[in-house]
Amino acid sequence: MSDTAELEPIGKREKTKAANRAAILVAARRVFAQLGYEAATVRDIIRGTELASGTFYNYFRSKEEVFEALADDSARRFRPILRLARAHARGFEDYLHSAFIAYFRFIAEENEDEGRPIDERRPHVRSDTPEMITVYQEVRQSLEDAIAHGDAPDVDADYLAHACIGIAQELGPAMLRRSPPDIDNAAAFATGLILKGLEGAPRKK
Amino acid sequence: MSDTAELEPIGKREKTKAANRAAILVAARRVFAQLGYEAATVRDIIRGTELASGTFYNYFRSKEEVFEALADDSARRFRPILRLARAHARGFEDYLHSAFIAYFRFIAEENEDEGRPIDERRPHVRSDTPEMITVYQEVRQSLEDAIAHGDAPDVDADYLAHACIGIAQELGPAMLRRSPPDIDNAAAFATGLILKGLEGAPRKK
DNA sequence: CCACAAAAATGACGTGCCGTCAATTTCTGT
DNA sequence: ACAGAAATTGACGGCACGTCATTTTTGTGG
């Protein structure tokens, strides 16, 4: 039995490998949040674990790489959420709204219980980063499908996807700055703006 | 005459100081463009001038600071352009369109004749950077005025300003990637989207 | 025109971080 | 239990940073 007990092929070796990688990521997330990306050093990160400095380099090539792994993690967790929104949506307008809600909730969760202003926390998240590119592709695919099905006008899907992402990225921090986080209004604003422009955006108050 | 000839109070001292600072900025712009922000070193920059390594620190405290000075320069050159667009605009719609055109032209000029892909060239330009905040304020003021004058619906000016900036920031690289740079279409797309939403955005082809 | 003080430039130096690597410990299969 | 593979360790060389005592340049008053 003992050899079949472990359904996943996990010996002690693989297990500590996964655990170490996870420990580094956890420590890195905390250190980046506390010190900011620039000030954080690889040694700061490794000090938050039980490992020695050299071991860091068995798992990541550099500070840059561990940061990107964190960002990739975020994207990997977000993509299924986006797909779910798409699967459940009744029509294009509903999809857009759900997607914005989902995104704003997601970053609200990611940013709570961290110790420094949002602005300094995600120093390198740009739209041309690998993890953001996959989100872009997801969004663009949805928009293209909507256009193909006649649910949306035949506009430039590349530009539209970028516009959606740009709105989301800028509205995100702006709505987090309000207390409590203004998730629903921001999502309504974004959706209204895209669907009908200024006339479709909610009036103030 | 000689003491009144120099209307600006510029002795040799002040002159070389200004020249040195300018030389460092020029060299820094080139080095950042060639190597990218991360790889560039203060010594790389100073090597592009006639100065010694220590002299750099008479003018800037760090690599970060010289980079920010470059970014501030960009913002300082862009703001009057934005104001001009506002002064010349006939109505709100015209202002929006001119502003997008101006922005896209500006970054197209900034990005030509530099030696590496756009994506890696402006590594730290985020919307929460000091120079971007002044642009945000400029945009927001214009939007608030338009709303006050009844030229635009009474929507949340903060969100609207962020949405405009987000669209501009994402559409910028996207339109630069096309050859030739797709300035006019991108501006039309952005303007149409904001004014009337998807219905107002240009149809493809 | 000179001498003297203030300002700026210089580059060698101390410090700290990075990433490597030979030695050591831990694990796996037989 | 043992041999070989895999992973960990921390000391080390190298590099970039930013400082500072020294030297050079500039401005000023006699």
Image: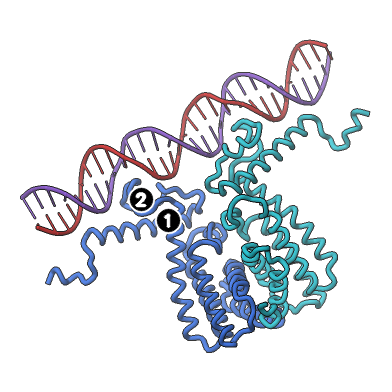
Chain colours: A blue, B cyan, C red, D purple
Quickly name the residue at label 2: A56
- For the image, the number of numbered tags is 2
Q: Amino acid at mark 1?
A: Val
Q: Residue at x 83, y 73 (%)?
A: B91
Labels 1 and 2 touching (C-beta < 8 A): yes
Left or right: D28, with A65 as reference point: right
Quickly name the residue at label 1: A66
Q: Residue at x 64, y 40 (%)?
A: B60
Q: In the rendered structure, which disc, 1 or 2, sits on the residue that comes first in sequence?
A: 2
- In the rendered image, is residue A205 in sight? no
Query: Which residue is nearer to you in this view: A121 or B63?
Result: B63
Residue B116: image location, x then y, percent: 59, 52
* Numbered tag placed on residue A195 in the rendering: none
- In the rendered image, is residue A147 in sight? yes
Count residues near mark 2 (Cα–Cα under 10 Å), then give few for <14, some for 14-19, many for 20+: many
* Residue A67 falls in image quadrant: bottom left
Q: Is residue A38 above or below residue A193?
A: above
Residue A129: image location, x then y, percent: 51, 61
Left or right: B92, with B7 as reference point: left
Q: Secondary structure at mark 2?
A: helix
Q: Quadrant of the N terminus of chain A?
A: bottom left
Report, in whole angstroms, how far the alpha carbon at label 1 lies from the one at label 2: 10 Å
Query: Which residue is nearer to you in this view: A17 or A185?
Result: A17
Q: Amino acid at mark 2?
A: Phe
Residue A96: image location, x then y, percent: 57, 81
Residue B105: image location, x then y, percent: 73, 61
